[in-house]
Amino acid sequence: MEFLAEYASFLAKIVTLVVAIIVVLAAVASLRSKGRRKSSGQLQVTRLNDFYKGLRERLESTLLNKDQLKALRKEQGKTEKKQKKTQKGDSKSRVFVLDFDGDIKASATDSLRHEITALLTLATPRDEVVLRLESGGGMVHSYGLASSQLARIRQAGVPLTVCIDKVAASGGYMMACIGEKIISAPFAILGSIGVVAQLPNVNRLLKKHDIDFEVLTAGEYKRTLTVFGENTEKGREKFQEDLEVTHELFKNFVTHYRPQLDINQVATGEVWLGIAALNKQLVDELKTSDEYLSERAREAELFHLHYAERKSLQERMGVAVAHSIEGAVIKAWGKLSQQRFW
């Protein structure tokens, strides 16, 4: 009992200290943020050719002896000089590499829009944009905006290649179809050209407990299906009609960018693995993004673009506090684990 009392006292001190720190930091953050605009983000640019070269040179330096490595570097230097003379001032084409990891709200669109705005200030039809896309889809309006951002690249006449290593389904495929070339890993998941909506209804449960729920609307179809109210057949029909309209717009969008598709065959909501998707012309080539980019690095300058939002003071403070709490808990647990119970 004495140990438990000591431990409770120790834990109370830790919690009190942490709470005090949070209060002080929150007050400081609030004062510093007054009158300031939200901090902007920053575009980060990485030259991928250097990355691939670094991987190769690291392997060479490990596998080759000193004389072999010296001879190889000398030969590589001669090759580079010869290539520079052959080019005679003509610069290599550029490949701008973007990433999109989509959630249900397509939150990555905020960064994507800035990345595209930046690259379009320099990119020409001689260059290329490669999007590494991963998304299982989500909200229609969110993925509609993300797709519209990619359409800006096509409208500017810059070639767009979309690489899919894992999944591009539903809204994800809506984005992918904008690419002039779609490259998929053999077992990536593609398709799901369809629309789905679902919601529970607890109206009968409410009635069972004598609870009334009223829905008042101005406009016949302001509300079709509800969670708490009693759904009508007319409301269901209208809801289904809205889904069909959205599906038709989705099909027309895909057909516009990939007219070679038999849209009625693939717009069933089904998904296919990359191998089968190639046969249905949902993709143009089977290859991983790593393979494609390493090939392009031999003949072009590759630049990876990532727009990172700067975290506010409050966000940075929150991360610091979380780490502090985690450290305090670990320390407390360490003290507890050192005790011996007899």
Image: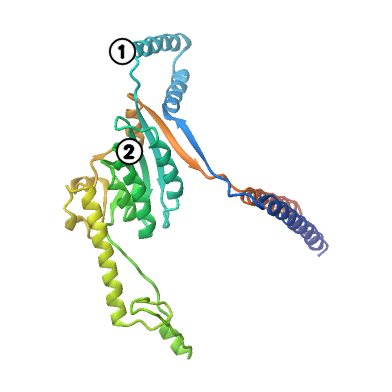
Say if mark 2 contacts mark 1, CB within 8 Å: no
Q: CA distance from mark 2 to mark 1?
A: 31 Å
* Residue drawn at the location 21% of the way across and 55% of the way down: 266
* Residue drawn at the location 60% of the way across and 49% of the way down: 37
Residue indicated by mark 2:
288
Q: Is residue 185 visible?
A: no
Q: Return the x and y of residue 259 as percentages of the image width and height.
A: 18, 48
Dot 2 or dot 1: first in sequence order is: 1
Q: Amino acid at mark 2?
A: Thr
Q: Return the x and y of residue 295 as percentages of the image width and height.
A: 32, 28
Q: Residue furthest right?
A: 2
Residue indicated by mark 1:
86
Q: Amino acid at mark 1?
A: Thr
Which sits in the foreground, 227 or 158?
158
Q: Return the x and y of residue 53 as percentages of the image width and height.
A: 43, 23
Which sits in the foreground, 277 or 310?
310
Secondary element at tag 1: helix
